[in-house]
Image: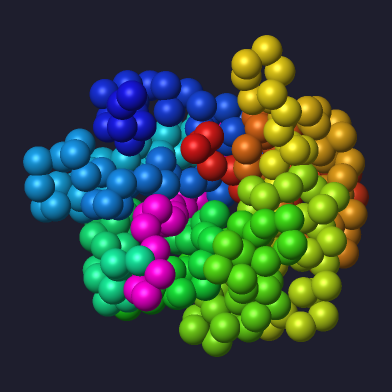
Amino acid sequence: GVCPEIWVLDHPDVLCRLQEAYMLAGASIVYAFTFGASRIKLAGHIENDGQVAQLNERLAALSIQTRDAFIHSHPGQTVLIAGDLAPTGQFLQPAGDLGFDDLVGIYQQQVAGQIAAGVDLFVVETMMDLAQTRAALLAGRQACELPVMVSLTVAENGRTLAGNTPQAALLTLAALGADAFGLNCSFGPEKLSDLILPLLAVSPIPLLIKPNAGLPQLIGGKTVFPMDAAAFASAMKPLAEAGIALLGGCCGTGPAHIAALANAISASGLQRAGINSPPD
């Protein structure tokens, strides 16, 4: 019954401890807690739209401060903080009332605040629509030269909610300047790998995958993700060996999953590139 982003600002130690745990586990990219920090999502929780950029700056700064303290204690390790841009929950015209230029402006507010905080890159994630993904990518591209990764989520048929195929989305977004493309959430590693691996043959940019810890199950009234850390890492290792550049965990993946993944990649002699974001 509360706004998660504002709750985090009132309880910053909770987020900082969580993100430090992922850094200790070996994550080299951690997402700022700005998934729902657009003015559409924040409506009813803030006094005016002018607070959006400031709120994004404060949220991103929490992750940056946590990273800086971690690096001070662990010299030689690299951890990047990604500003997180996500779906607004509304549809673009003609399916909805949202205009494309308006949506670019909504993401620009978030981008401005996150740049002010000092993020290292941006990730446009869990997107269900190519057009909205384009809007977020353009907002980042117009504001700065920082890298922008894009990541879509797909339905059972392997397409986004809007009907876009991963290959069509990849080629479109790469042409618009995306620095990496991938899929996140959706499924566990096995099914998501069936969708991402064919893209290696056509992709002009690095690919990323950030699956859930298996398909969720309702047990005792709680949503549980059944795949343990060892099984998750075992399923992900072949993706690294095949050439997927960025590997991470979405829903249900705790620090143990990222630690097992980082260890599996290191054991295979590949460069480690674990990514993780706070639970949605």
Q: Residue at x 55, y 68 (%)?
A: 162
Q: Quadrant of residue 145?
A: bottom left
Question: Residues in magenta?
Answer: 74-95
Q: Nearer the viewer, residue 167 or 140?
A: 167
Can residue 274 be spotted in the picture?
A: no
**Left-right relation of 173 to 232:** left
Q: Relative to 15, is 148 above or below?
A: below
> Looking at the image, which residue sits at the far top?
220
Q: Is residue 231 above or below residue 91?
A: above
Residue sitting at x 52%, y 72%: 130
Position in image of residue 187 (x %, y %) = 73, 47
Residue 77's x, y, as percent? 60, 44
Image check: 190 left or right of 72? right
Residue shown at the point (39%, 63%) measured from the top left: 91
Residue 26: say if magenta. Answer: no
All told, the count of numbered labels is 0
> Residue 278, percent across and down?
51, 36
Residue 24 to residue 164: above or below: above
Quadrant containing the N terminus is top left
Please identify the residue farthest to the bottom as the structure is shown. Answer: 175
Q: Position of residue 189 (x, y in %)?
A: 80, 48
Q: Is residue 214 visible?
A: yes
**Does 75 lie within the magenta span?**
yes
- Closer to us: 162 or 266: 162
Name the residue nearer the viewer: 67 or 89.
89
Taking 259 as reference, is 265 left or right? Answer: right
Q: Nearer the viewer, residue 131 or 197?
A: 131
Main SS class of the magenta portion in the image: loop
